Image: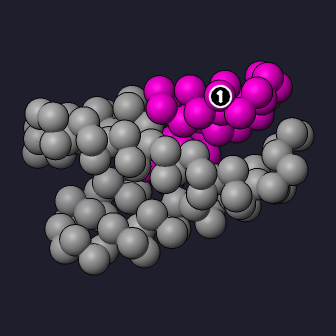
């Protein structure tokens, strides 16, 4: 069970770091939108990681990542201030963090 907690913590921490960095790279500066990004990822990331932990089939990554993109995009659209294209932002931020995560895993 300790491995699961470590995986959840590492994944969430890295995702928050990378997606907050992506937020900054896109010239977004609204602190409330940044907090919203953090909260949206706290909502989706552990659920995605836990589900993949329980159902570790490579094809499961696609629907799980789509779930995260759609859910976060909805949150940005409904509650965000500066997200002109919230679903596109969510897709780009998730692709960025997923891609960097894959690179990090290959290096480890």
Position of the C terminus by quadrant? top left
Q: Position of residue 13 (x, y in %)?
A: 39, 30
Q: Please tell me whether residue 82 belongs to the stretch shown in magenta.
A: no
Q: Is residue 16 above or below residue 46?
A: above
**Tag 1, which secondary structure?**
helix
* 20 in magenta: yes
- Few, some or many residues within 10 Å of mark 1 (<14, 14–19, 20+): few
The reply to whether residue 95 is in sight is yes
Report which quarter residue 88 is drawn in: bottom right
Q: Which residue is mark 1?
A: 25
The residue at the point 33 percent across, 67 percent down is 61
41 above or below 86?
A: above
Residue 107 locus on image (x, y percent):
15, 35
Q: Residue at x 71, y 33 (%)?
A: 26
Residue 79 or residue 66, whichever sits in front: 66
Q: Position of residue 10 (x, y in %)?
A: 28, 33
- Judge left or right: residue 102 versus residue 35: left
54 or 37, which is in the foreground?
37
Q: How is the image coloured?
A: one colour
Residue 57 placement: quadrant: bottom left
Q: Is residue 101 left or right of residue 41?
A: left
Range shown magenta: 16-45
Residue at figure coordinates x 64%, y 38% from the top left = 37
């Amino acid at each position: 069970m300790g491995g699961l907690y470590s995986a959840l913590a590492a994944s969430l921490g890295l995702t928050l770091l990378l997606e907050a960095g992506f937020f900054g790279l896109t010239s977004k500066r609204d602190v409330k939108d940044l907090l919203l990004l953090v909260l949206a990822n706290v909502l989706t990331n552990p659920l995605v990681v836990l589900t993949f932990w329980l159902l570790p089939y490579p094809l499961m990554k696609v629907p799980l990542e789509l779930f995260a993109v759609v859910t976060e995009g909805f949150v940005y659209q409904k509650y965000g201030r500066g997200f002109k294209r919230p679903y596109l932002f969510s897709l780009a931020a998730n692709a960025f963090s997923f891609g960097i995560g894959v690179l990090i895993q290959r290096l480890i």
